[in-house]
Image (cartoon, rainbow, N blue to C red):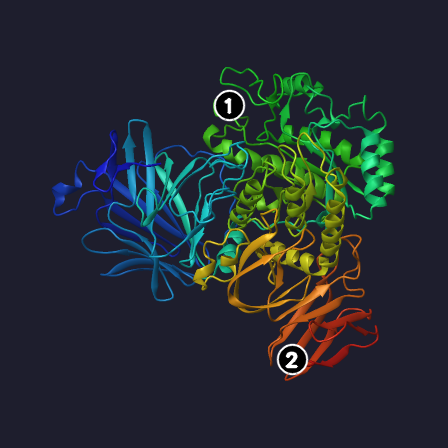
Amino acid sequence: MKFSNGYWRMRDGVRPLYPAQVHDVEVEPTALTVYAPTRRITGRGDTLNQPLLTVRCTAPAPDVVSVRVGHFLGRRPRHPDFVLASEPGTEVQVTDDAEYASITSGGLTARFARGDGWRLEFVADGRVLTGSGYKSMAALDTDDGSYVREQLSLGVGETVYGLGERFGPLVRNGQVVDIWQEDGGTSSEQAYKNVPFYLTTGGYGVFVNHPGLVSFEVGSEVVSRVSFSVAGQSLEYLVIYGPTPHEILRKYTALTGRPALPPAWSFGLWLSTSFTTSYDEQTVSSFIDTMAELELPLSVFHFDCFWMREFHWSNFEWDPRVFPEPELMLERLRKRDLKVCVWINPYIAQRSALFAEGAARGYLVRTADGDVWQCDLWQAGMGLVDFTNPDARRWYADKLRVLLDMGVDAFKTDFGERIPTDVVWHDGADPERMHNYYTHLYNQTVFDLLREHRGEGEAVLFARSATAGGQQFPVHWGGDCESTFESMAESLRGGLSLAMSGFGFWSHDIGGFEGRPAPEVFKRWIPFGLLSSHSRLHGSQTYRVPWTFDEEAVDVLRIFTRLKARLMPYLFGQAVLAHAEGIPVMRPLVADFPDDPAVTHLERQYLLGDSLLVAPVFRADGQVDFYLPAGTWTHLQTGEEITGPGWVRRTVGFDQVPVLVRPGTVLPLGANADRPDYSFADGVTLAVYQLADGQQVQVSVPALDGSEAARFVVARHGTAVTADRVAGPALPWRVQLVGHGEVREVAADISRWQGELTDR
């Protein structure tokens, strides 16, 4: 939201109040409060008839400083609020001297300059990370209401990332971003997942602690600043010092929550009925039978909206006309070793049997005059479940519990963005704040039920909407995209943006959602989909089974589904890292190579975990350009070695995609290519890539519950390479010195292997 008219003037109807100087300071053991008049004080008379801004700083965790700016502080508290996990016992230093009033947490100091003028700086490692100077912080009275704004400086060449799942350019500089949930697809500035958090290549992140509308001007209103504003009389933001992107994300997710560990089976291939296609149990069975006949590994079958009867969404009852025996059908699917997911949403159609029940019990959101809020958008006469009501949450969860008892394993929690603001919530929540926050309560309700019913480590969603903290309830998918190369690219940008907003797991509809993809689009999308954390075949009006495209699509799907299964010891290990530390499985290269200026704007390639670089192909002819950071990288499929730094152009068939192994990697590869959930340590292959002389690499192979099943240490000394099993049971294992010979088998009772690098 812009308040200024260029550099010199404010827009019509805008009356700003800027802090002019530090007038007084209150020092507490763990807090610093600064009182800043909006005109310079030269005598007692200047203290009359002028506003005073209050700026209070605290330290909820090491390397984190919270800044709360307020004008009129007598407003009653609004809720909901984001739930932040502060770290008790955080060591805080608060000082006040002639030069600065300061608060320090860990390596981060926020300091207010004494004397004339206004300057707030955030300092770490001997340098100013960012700061708020003259006419940056402001309380603004406008013809449309009151706002509080802050502007933090950007350095030369500093790039900004995050603010949720956004489908435009990955680098936010120059963009205007409103944190406001919308059901707008993937082709506009609107977003399903809005997160008021950004991080920069300057070594810090900023989280605006407001669940409602936050308007960001990222180098747009003032090109050398990030501006953010909220309606009302106060604004809180937290500055998080890294200095690396990994450390920023670790500290941010420690505050807002880290993702649960999804079950290993969820990393396999999901197949859907699609949306408006015609289907019944015979259709489902034919899809599953053909997948098996064609040796296409399948883990999850998803039933989209029309598993329920039209005009009845959501009543959570199978449409008896097409699924007359759902319990028996689910039992048949279970015997085929398949998991089952069904579509749900938080809207209750007027024709649903749950509408009258929910209305009578007060479980649906109401208008100011006490009526049930209703609309005809999406479902005729639909109401909205009021998740601020604990009884309504239990009621909704109990309806889903029946499906879990029946044999359903997961839920696709669709929608949650179209939340009205002209309503009254059960707990008195502020409607503006609830618009964005509703999705959090919705997904939390469903995820908590799954965790309670299925057990820790077995809960998984396929969610579309989210806000800050929503990363705790994986998995999220990119929403409704078109079936084109352009939409494939915008989907990837959205996923990378979400990763830089603290989300560990992400997926998308292979082939796109709207329309029918051309065979070349579908076949190029397959490796991108299977080399994502989670992989789903799903469309709108048409099926996404590969044989409806061509025979080659079947082969391509088989290749990459089996490749992902073999990668599971590595991928699930990266999932454990995301769960434990908040580092996303998929992420842009700038997250790992922040000192390489060539990677800041890369948005058509990504890292899949610590050690794999993936460059999807966005052209039918197979031409692809990608950048490699320094070192000799190895193509996972072909073994080609390519030395960076530099740009590379290749032309590849549909059965290949540039997937490069980082130098110095020991990649654990599984012995099973048919499923994602198996004993990863049994028969694991340690593939050694470009180990430097003197380098030692520790490899942890996870168990299905996320614990460590085995641990190996691989080291190189000259031409000699040793591999030691230092933890885990006596199981057979293998070692491959990639580029230096075949895979070497190691017997179960042998804990040390030694080999030599050969001349090539």
Name the residue beneath numbered marker 1.
424
Q: Residue 215, relative to residue 560: is it above or below?
A: above
**Which quadrant of the figure contains the N terminus?**
top left
Q: Residue 125, relative to residue 286: is it above or below?
A: below
Query: Mark 2 or mark 1: which is in front?
Result: 2
Q: Report x, y in % for residue 47.
A: 17, 42
Q: Report x, y in % for residue 272.
A: 73, 37
The foreground one among 614 and 521 is: 521
The residue located at (27%, 47%) in the rendering is 35
* Farthest residue, direction front: 621
The foreground one among 420 and 558 is: 558
The residue located at (70%, 81%) in the rendering is 758
Q: Residue 646, relative to residue 34: is it above or below?
A: below
**In-image side of 77 versus 659 (left or right):** left
Q: Report x, y in % for residue 487.
A: 56, 40
Q: Report x, y in % for residue 436.
A: 51, 34
**Which quadrant of the figure contains the C terminus?**
bottom right
The foreground one among 66 and 609 is: 609
Q: Is residue 455 visible?
A: no
Query: Number of numbered discs present?
Result: 2
Name the residue beneath numbered marker 2.
716
As measured in the structure, the alpha-carbon distance from the residue carrying label 2 to the one carrying label 1 is 66 Å
Amino acid type at mark 1:
Val
